[in-house]
């Protein structure tokens, strides 16, 4: 398997993404990141349906967002995904996601996530298996644009 150079999705900021200050609310940034992670896994054959059938699901130990530039209604954005680190047993991973203003690829936010997969019966952390494991072998390790 060959590692992908990049994986991203493009979105347009809608009314539902805004807060009272007329810029994108912080929860929308997290939701864009969530959507890209699931889209990536699904592209790799590790769909939410497969995870459910296997009795596992992705979990986060922590996540944080660093904000650099405001995003506003009708702006186009690009959200990427990159693997920063994974344990040898594929139990724990660190993923970095960047949100860019599409115009000029200006960094608007950086999402850092530490997570794993959980066995839904035992409620314990478990290693990524099958297509989930393989997805980490091809996940990009660099952002679309280096800073």
Image: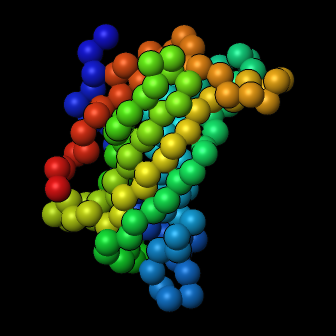
Q: Position of residue 127 (x, y in %)?
A: 59, 20
- The answer to which quarter of the image holds residue 139 is top left
Q: Is residue 107 left or right of residue 41?
A: left
* Residue in view at x 48 percent, y 33 percent: 93
Q: Position of residue 111 (x, y in %)?
A: 42, 55
In the rendered image, is residue 73 in sight?
A: yes
Compared to residue 21, the image places residue 128 above or below, namely: above
Compared to residue 48, the image places residue 100 above or below, namely: below
Q: Position of residue 23 (x, y in %)?
A: 45, 80
Q: Position of residue 34 (x, y in %)?
A: 53, 47
User: Quick one: quadrant of the N terminus?
Assistant: top left
The residue at the far right in this view is 121
* Residue in view at x 18 percent, y 50 percent: 145
User: Quick one: quadrant of the C terminus?
Assistant: bottom left
* Residue in view at x 42 percent, y 24 percent: 136
The residue at the far bottom in this view is 21
In the rendered image, is residue 75 in sight?
A: no
Q: Nearer the viewer, residue 55 or 7?
A: 55
Compared to residue 22, the image places residue 70 above or below, namely: above
Coloring basis for residues: rainbow
């Amino acid at each position: 398997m060959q590692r992908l150079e990049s994986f991203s999705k493009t979105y347009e900021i809608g009314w539902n993404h805004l807060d009272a200050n007329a810029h994108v609310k912080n929860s929308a940034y997290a939701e864009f990141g969530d959507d890209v992670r699931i889209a990536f896994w699904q592209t790799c054959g590790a769909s939410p349906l497969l995870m459910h059938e296997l009795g596992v699901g992705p979990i986060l130990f922590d996540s944080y967002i660093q904000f650099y530039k405001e995003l506003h209604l009708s702006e186009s954005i690009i959200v990427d995904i990159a693997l920063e680190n994974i344990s040898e047993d594929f139990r724990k991973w660190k993923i970095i996601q960047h949100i860019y203003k599409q115009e000029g690829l200006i960094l608007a936010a950086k999402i850092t996530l530490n997570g794993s997969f959980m066995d839904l019966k035992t409620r314990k952390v478990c290693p990524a298996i099958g297509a989930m494991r393989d997805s980490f072998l091809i996940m990009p390790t660099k952002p679309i644009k280096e800073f």
